Amino acid sequence: MEPARLKLAGRMAALEPSATLAMAARAGALKAAGCDVIDLSVGEPDFPTPEHICRAGHEAITAGFTKYTPAAGIPALRKAVAEDYTRRSGLAVTPAQVVISSGAKHALHNVFTALLDEGDEVVVPAPFWVSYAELVKLTGARPVLVETSIDDDFKLRPEALRAALSPRTRMLLVCSPSNPTGVVYRPEELAALADVAIEADLAVVADEIYDQLVFDGRKSPSFPTLRPGLAERTVVVAGVSKTYSMTGWRIGWTIAPEPLSKAIGNLQSQETSNPSSISQHAALAALTGPQDCVAAMRDVFQKRRDLVAGRLRALPGVRLPDVGGAFYAFFDIREPLAAARSAGITTSGQWCEALLERQQVALVAGSAFGAEGHVRMSFAAGDGQLGRGLDRIAAFLADSGATRG
């Protein structure tokens, strides 16, 4: 008798794996095979987690903080998040509005699950982080992808948002500083989107995970501070992964109106019980301890941005938006793609595959972010690695074999 076969749920058939993690796995396999691969695919700071944060994790273990915690997070960390956000944004929030989760990705999942019903629509500006659309689809809702242009620095315009609305539109998702583009919206640009959201009675999810990684003295305003009444319809998602180089610690959070936060806490109590107790104590040390590590990492990222932007803009046929934050360069390769058509390279995915094969540099195709003809490069890597990677990209573009077959 044949063994019973497990039939996957229909929602799994529509789920795409993370293209970023897939490329990182490819690069890792080539490295393990002895290839000199330069992996610029993953958005992960290359700095070690600051020592005082690691020490807090060790101390938590020693002190026996290794048991279950309240589902929404330890009170001290919820209080620290509320105080940190209030101090930096100017908008007063309470610990009851904060729910600590197992990373910002988990926080987003919680928000979508708590707010979206089957058939609801969520406006998502493209390019977008690879997980947004998939997490929305898992709820039975539909992501409505709105194309933006490099000529507008990939920023969603209010008229484009209005045009995307339908009777089923429930939510707007914004990310500034942006993954994958590194673009930072100006306050008046976000305010114009806020006006449409208020007019259309939309919920807003503001992914502000990169809000402290901004360059050139710019400010990255928090979305609910831009207009009266926005705080009642906005969920801010953030965490410690990028700001404090704590990706593996898996601590993120939501800041939301209290009734929604209570619902998210109830949801999380059934999903994961609580985030890691040890990681929560480390995150508490990150928020309440010295902040000079944040400024130091930001300064390094800005210098890397200068290096990468200057080198990419010097390449023939390559275009780049104004990279004001985060640690990504999302560049336009449509002209090089047109030149490579005779070699059978017609998509950004094929271009990235050829670059990995011929020059051992791992980037992520723009198609994964909803923007075919573009490529994302992470500059969360050392100057030497970035320089070598840029040299290889330049050689790939100049190689007649890369462009003429």
Image: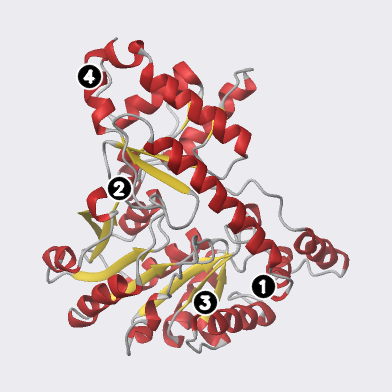
301 to 72, vertically: above or below: above
The percent position of residue 188, horizontal first and vertical second, equals: 30, 75
Q: Dots 4 and 3: beta carbons under 8 Å?
A: no
Q: What residue type is labelled 1?
A: Leu
Q: Dots 2 and 3: beta carbons under 8 Å?
A: no
Q: Residue at x 50, y 84 (%)?
A: 97
Nearest the viewer among 324 and 18 is 324
The answer to which of marks 3 and 1 sits earlier in the sequence is: 3
The percent position of residue 105, horizontal first and vertical second, equals: 48, 59
The label shown at residue 10 is 2
Q: Residue at x 29, y 77 (%)?
A: 191
The answer to which of marks 4 and 2 sits earlier in the sequence is: 2
206 to 396, vertically: above or below: below
The label shown at residue 265 is 3
The percent position of residue 29, horizontal first and vertical second, equals: 57, 25
What residue is shown with label 4?
Answer: 341
Nearest the viewer among 266 and 350 is 350
The label shown at residue 287 is 1
Q: Residue at x 54, y 53 (%)?
A: 302
